[in-house]
Image (tube, grey):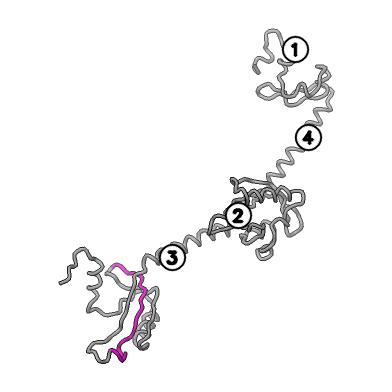
Amino acid sequence: MISLSGSNRLREIISFLGRTGYFSHPSAPLYEICYLGSALFTKTGTGKCFRHYHYHRSEFCCSELESHSRNLLRHNRCRCHEESGILAVGRDITERKKAEEKLKKSEKFYRTLIADSLDVTLLLNEKGEIIFTTPAIHRLLGYEREEVLSTNAFQYIHPEDLAWAIQSFEKEVEENPEIKFIIVRVLQKSGSWLWCMIRGHNLLDNPDINAIAIYLHDDTPRKMAHVALQESEKRFRSLVRDLHVGVLVQNREGRIEMTNQAMCRMFDTTEEVLLGGKIWEIYDDVIHEDGRIFLQYQ
């Protein structure tokens, strides 16, 4: 007598004895069932593998089965025996199928993120050659993906920024530093230059990547705003310096950040003496006796 206590798998196997061999899922298409029956009963003595085959485990549960079957009904070695049939060995692959489906969903998720990203992701080998790029490169730079693959990434960098870009890349390869940013001009297919913020990440030690990841972001709006601010400040400084009245610009701490020649003449000094200092520390005799004027800065 066989004890079934503590053996759910054995009880499940014995429960199949005497039952029909058709355990196909109700939702399985008719061609799948016909193919299964045809393969089992017409292929004499040959092994057949049926993958991703659904079968009933219970009234409310179905599983994925990988089955290797052999038809012994007309096998010569079985004709001498009273009983013959179809020998089938099955393996439950439900968990494997669930893992595969989860992986497919994950891949689809990240593939969608990459496809819709506004930034460009490149993978470079140790020579700086592009081995992978995302579709966003066409939107940002105008190139098709096939045009840039196997080309050297540095050929797209502005000559004035090239030395800095190469130096940063070599540090990524040799020293594997922390992730950092550089801002360089990148050549577009149209021939114009685009200001890009570039971040590098050394993934050469990652066996799944084995490359340098480069992330490109269009930095043109910020760069243009910075240039406009610099030009505005330059015009302001020029205006102040040309005034015939003395101008002194101080920060919240009372330190002098800007002055002009008229003010320097008034104090009989130079800009170098005034800039960075506090006026009451440099010329205490110009302070009102009760300290009302500069008391707020002390």
Residue, far left: 1
- What residue did someone put label 4 on? 234
Tell me, for residue 286, which label it has, or none.
1
Q: Of callouts 2 and 4, which one flags the residue occurring earlier in the amino acid sequence?
A: 2
Magenta part of the protein: which range?
60-77
Closer to viewer: mark 2 or mark 4: 2
Distance CA(mark 1)–CA(mark 4):
30 Å
Callout 3: SS: helix
Q: Nearer the viewer, mark 1 or mark 2?
A: 2
Q: Earlier in the sequence, mark 3 or mark 1?
A: 3
288 or 215, which lies in front?
215
Sequence order check: which comes first, mark 3 or mark 4?
Answer: 3
Q: Which residue is mark 3?
A: 100
Residue plotted at (84% across, 19% down): 265
Residue receiving disc 2: 213
Residue type highlighted by circle 1 = Val
